[in-house]
Image (spheres, grey):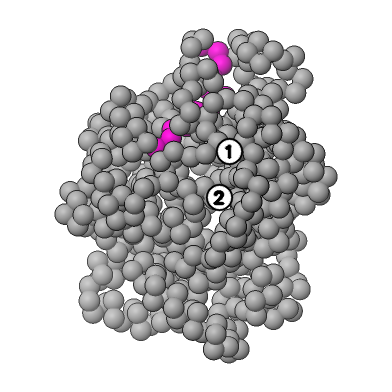
Amino acid sequence: MRFERAAGVLLHPTSLPGRFGIGDLGDSAYHFVDFLVAARQQLWQLLPLGPTGYGDSPYQSFSAFAGNPLLISPERLVADGYLPAEAIEDVPDFPAGEVDFGPVIDYKKVLLNQAHQYFLAHGDETQHEEYKRFCQNTAYWLDDYAFFMALKEYHKEQDGGVWNTWPKQIAKRQVRAMKQWAKQLAAEIESHKFQQFLFYKQWLALKAYANGQGIKIIGDLPIFVAYDSADVWAHPELFYLDKDGAPSVVAGVPPDYFSTTGQRWGNPLYRWEAFAADHYDWWVRRIHMNLVQADIVRIDHFRGFEAYWEIPASEPTAVIGRWVKGPDAAVFEAIQAKLGELPIIAEDLGVITPEVEALRDRFDFPGMRILQFAFGGTRNSSFLPYNYVHNTIVYTGTHDNETTLGWYLNATEDERDHLRRYTVSSGRDIVWDLIRLAYASVADMAIIPMQDLFVLGNEARMNYPGREGGWWRWRYTRDMFTARAPGIAMGLSELAHLYGRLPAETIKPVETTSP
């Protein structure tokens, strides 16, 4: 699907400022949308919105369909009548510039359980009817997710609560055990359903506000799901698992220029023939739910649909493995037959073959180009703007890269020299030189990480692929935003005007989409 010429900003909601330890869907999110409008932007790109699991990574979620309860705004709960005002008067002294996930999770868990109890005691007829409707519309994933989360919390002391360490009867979803546990954990299951109701109520209200201001949301869909997820527990037949329920083979990428041992992600691999037998119904539902959350969806590791790197689960690294053919066009043909033309971005970074490019181009999905990859080495890199085609999304960097300032400071002199000569720059304002380069390119969409707009170094880096612990934490502060956002908006507005990325002048409001 082709997209209009536009520009936008990459920022995950967890990075928004606020007093509750993590960015959320409250006032700061609405203020960020207002900033995008002032900056003449048309796109807000996010990371996956699912509930985070191992390592707090949004790419390792407990569900391919659920939203992250940590993003629920306590202040909006009070405003909407789901909490009394005194519930948020005493808030821990969380750090302002980063997410300390452990304390935040503990705090939000208590608060959300309190909201559920308050709803049961004081919720009016309209609220209860809205909740009932939500549960009915999303039952195909919500029932399994809420049950899974309740079980996981109950068994959290046993090997972290990973589902294949539970008693065999419930791990294998035997009928009698399912009935017994459903009765025993009924209150907990209902609480998790209610949290999803609150998430989607707040998220879809924010999305409607953004859409009404002419801002489209770009979501993010990891190709693989986490092993410790409701998806694998509820549908083990769709994955390569051994007799004990553990993965027999896992996902990753082979060794390359960036890593001599490759990347062993550990996600279970799909039994694609099982999906094909059901006309890829699970994938149709997954893409549909992502298009409820967002207007456009970036698929991470798109090349895995053509071929994926299969690693024996017993291997500690990704060195030993093999390429296995994926479903190729069949999965997208099935999805398109049900959902129509697909507003999808293909993350086509890394080692990309002609077959992957053919799959991408068959459906007219735009690919990605990263300016940080363009300089040094060969002087005709595909990441240099003069090699772009229009149907491309250009970034200065992504959540997996250094910030642009951090990259430049760590770059070789050959890379810096190439960049300065390419941009006819002294290097004094090199981050905004690259932002200008992205805007000036022929790429249909230009997306800039918020860290680059603030010209921050690697202290603001979001993730480092292959390294565990301590990532996904960066937040900007309210003072930083207040002081610098007006100037940034002015600069982006000028670039959007200069390089033909202005939004349409007349924007019609849109209504909230129900999941």
Q: Circle 2 sits on which residue?
A: 216
The structure residue drawn at horizontal position 60% and vertical position 60%, both measured from the top left corner, is 509
Q: How far apart, in angstroms, are the residues tagged by discs 1 and 2? A: 10 Å
Determine which quarter of the picture holds residue 244: bottom left
> 241 or 35: nearer the eye?
35
- Considering only vertical position in the picture, is 273 above or below 440? below
Q: Is residue 148 visible?
A: no
The structure residue drawn at horizontal position 51% and vertical position 84%, both measured from the top left corner, is 128
Where residue 15 sits: x, y (%)?
65, 50
- Where the C terminus falls, by quadrant? bottom left
Q: Circle 1 sits on which residue?
A: 6
The structure residue drawn at horizontal position 36% and vertical position 26%, both measured from the top left corner, is 352
Q: Is residue 329 left or right of residue 104?
A: left
Q: Helix or strand or loop: what does disc 1 sit on?
A: strand
Determine which quarter of the picture holds residue 199: bottom right
Q: Is residue 267 visible?
A: yes
- Where the N terminus falls, by quadrant? top left
Magenta residues span 365-377
Q: Amino acid at mark 1?
A: Ala
